[in-house]
Image (cartoon, rainbow, N blue to C red):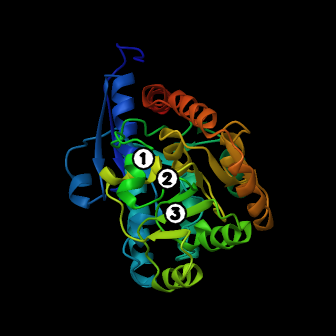
């Protein structure tokens, strides 16, 4: 989906410390596909030596700002100095005519690390960034309400992950690889094991479901040792809950997704959710809370929403009754509408509008 071929050249640098999620690389490829006059590059950090050299980019597009000052969970003093340095660099760039775009992946740091610094970073960005990008209307409303930012706020949805990861095995092959019997209805949680994702609520709801024909799989790298210990204690001795608490290589994602009937996202809070788009890209309906991005993503033919922790048991029960083949087709069809060429064209138009 190429847009105006005669547009003047632009160079966009994406600033992101996230390495495992291919979001930024997919976005950059979509932008270049949509507007060949836009050239992109990726930087994990923003060193002074790059800024002091001859100007090399026109737009800095920032992602996950909290990782620029809290990466590796540094002490508060070091994180504060890192943020001050970062904001000074942003001011330096804007004084030289370089535009700053900020994508709001999270309004707050998930574990509440250095909340005062998160607030300071947000306040500066929402006051000074040339453009703010959010993935849905709910996030746009939150930005307007909390930070009074309404101008140059662009709503561009999250893209899919279709074809990004291997997906060659069928259900039987996948379950055989993981040692899962062919009969159970399988709920899957996959992703980093972090407290804000509500896994403890999911486990307790699954236990209360008390359905011998079901199984719960939890797969992903665990960070917090205490939280991981709590999770293990909750599932101890329960044969129908399987834990794979380790990093899942890209090649192995297909075994977990293709073993599952439904994916569960029992998050306590969410601003956007690439996880839902990943689930849909593997043709899996989801169970998710009616917060943040999920009400716009989950319809009765694509999964089940729940409103409180107490509702989660009933939501799992309703998901058990889904026609999973039909729901899988609906989720995949929806994911296909979120292609990166279309999304790249929208980002390219945003860049053009502020350049």
The residue wearing badge 1 is 172
Q: Is residue 81 visible?
A: yes
Instruction: Give coordinates of residue 2: x percent, y percent.
Output: 39, 17
Instruction: Give coordinates of residue 324: x percent, y percent.
Output: 62, 40
Q: Quadrant of the C terminus?
A: top left
Q: Which mark is residue 217?
A: 3
The reply to whether discs 1 and 2 touch (Cβ–Cβ < 8 Å) is yes
Residue at 42% x, 53% y is 175
Q: Residues within 10 Å of mark 2 (few under 14, many from 20)?
A: some
140 or 259: nearer the viewer: 259
Instruction: Give coordinates of residue 214: x percent, y percent.
Output: 62, 60
Above or below for 195 versus 139: below
Q: Residues within 10 Å of mark 3 (few under 14, many from 20)?
A: many
- The quarter of the picture where residue 137 lies is top right
Above or below for 226 versus 52: below
50 or 340: nearer the viewer: 340
Instruction: Give coordinates of residue 213: x percent, y percent.
Output: 63, 59
Labels 1 and 2: the sequence-earlier one: 1
Q: Is residue 92 visible?
A: no
Labels 3 and 2: the sequence-earlier one: 2
* Left or right of 69 in this view: 195: right
Q: Which mark is residue 321?
A: none
Residue at 63% x, 71% y is 203
The residue wearing badge 2 is 182
125 or 340: nearer the viewer: 340
Judged by depth in the image, the label closer to the viewer, 3 or 2, is 2
- The quarter of the picture where residue 222 lies is bottom left
Residue at 69% x, 43% y is 322
Q: Residues within 10 Å of mark 1 (few under 14, many from 20)?
A: some
Tell me the CA gap for discs 3 and 2: 14 Å
Tell me the element at label 3. Answer: strand
Judged by depth in the image, the label closer to the viewer, 3 or 1, is 1
């Amino acid at each position: 989906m190429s847009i105006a071929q005669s547009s003047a050249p632009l160079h966009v640098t994406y600033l992101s410390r996230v390495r495992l999620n291919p979001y930024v690389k997919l976005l950059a490829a979509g932008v270049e596909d949509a507007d060949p006059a836009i050239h992109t590059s990726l930087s994990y950090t923003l060193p002074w030596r790059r800024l002091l050299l001859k100007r090399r980019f026109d737009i800095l597009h920032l992602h996950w700002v909290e990782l620029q000052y809290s990466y590796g969970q540094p002490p508060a003093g070091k994180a504060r100095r890192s943020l001050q340095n970062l904001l000074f660099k942003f001011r330096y760039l804007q004084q030289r005519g370089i535009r700053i775009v900020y994508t709001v992946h999270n309004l707050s740091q998930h574990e509440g690390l250095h909340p005062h610094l998160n607030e300071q970073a947000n306040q500066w960005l929402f006051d000074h960034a040339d453009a703010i990008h959010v993935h849905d209307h709910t996030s746009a409303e939150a930005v307007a309400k909390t930070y009074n930012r309404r101008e140059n706020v662009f709503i561009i949805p999250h893209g899919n992950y279709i074809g990004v990861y291997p997906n060659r095995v069928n259900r039987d092959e996948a379950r055989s690889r993981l040692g899962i019997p062919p009969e159970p209805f399988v709920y899957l949680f996959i992703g980093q094991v972090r407290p804000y994702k509500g896994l403890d609520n999911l486990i307790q709801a699954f236990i209360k479901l008390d359905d011998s024909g079901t199984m719960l799989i939890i797969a992903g790298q665990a960070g917090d040792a205490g939280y991981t210990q709590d999770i293990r204690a909750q599932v101890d001795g329960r044969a129908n809950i399987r834990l794979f608490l380790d990093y899942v290589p890209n090649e192995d994602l297909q075994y977990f997704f293709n073993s599952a009937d439904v994916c569960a996202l029992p998050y306590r809070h969410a601003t956007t959710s690439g996880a839902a788009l990943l689930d849909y890209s593997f043709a899996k309906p989801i169970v998710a809370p009616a917060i943040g991005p999920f009400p716009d993503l989950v319809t009765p033919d694509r999964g089940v929403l729940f409103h409180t922790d107490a509702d989660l048991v009933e939501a799992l029960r309703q998901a058990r009754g889904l026609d999973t083949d039909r729901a899988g087709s609906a989720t995949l069809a929806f994911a296909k509408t979120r292609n990166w060429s279309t999304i790249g064209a929208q980002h390219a138009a945003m860049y053009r509008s502020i350049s």
